[in-house]
Image: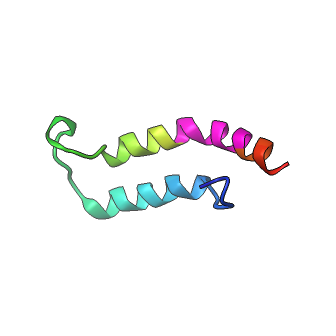
Amino acid sequence: MTIAGYDSEESIAFWTRMGEMSGGQAPAFLSTHPSNKQRIANLAAAISNAKETADRITQ
């Protein structure tokens, strides 16, 4: 996303809104997809690396 020019920080805001709208969720071990909280944590951990990679590629 970052390399394509999208604001990667917006992905966290997006999943925060999705979490607010979805209400309760099944326990993670019953789901085939990560919870909204886990998605947000994964994105937050990856954003700085994605920005560094995008900077190297686009220079």
Furthest residue to the bottom? 21
**Residue nearer the viewer, 48 or 20:** 48
Q: Residue at x 54, y 40 (%)?
A: 44
Instruction: Report if residue 51 lies within the magenta region.
Output: yes
Query: Whole-percent x and y of residue 38?
Result: 37, 40
- Residue 37 lies within the magenta run: no
Q: Residue 29 in the image: state x and y as whole percent.
A: 17, 35
- In the shown orientation, is residue 37 left or right of residue 8? left
Q: Which residue occupies the foreground of this view, 10 or 33?
A: 33
Tell me residue 9's x, y (percent): 60, 53
Residue nearest the viewer, comparing 18 with 2: 2
Query: Who is closer to the viewer here, 41 or 52?
Result: 52
The residue range painted magenta reads 44-53
Please name the residue shown 69% across and 61% down the image. 5
Would you identify the image quadrant in which residue 28 lies?
top left
Q: Is 2 located above or below residue 31 in the figure?
A: below
Query: Which residue sits furthest right?
Result: 59
Q: In this view, does 10 lie above or below 50?
A: below
- Please determine whether, in this image, residue 56 is positioned above or below residue 10: above
Residue at the location (61% across, 42% down)? Answer: 47
- Prevailing secondary structure of the magenta residues: helix
Direction from residue 49 to residue 46 in the image, left or right? left
Query: In this figure, what is the number of numbered marks?
Result: 0
- Residue at 35% x, 48% y: name it: 36
Please identify the quadrant where the N terminus is shown.
bottom right
Where is residue 56 shown, x and y percent of the image? 79, 41
- Give the color scheme: rainbow, by chain, secondary structure or one colour: rainbow
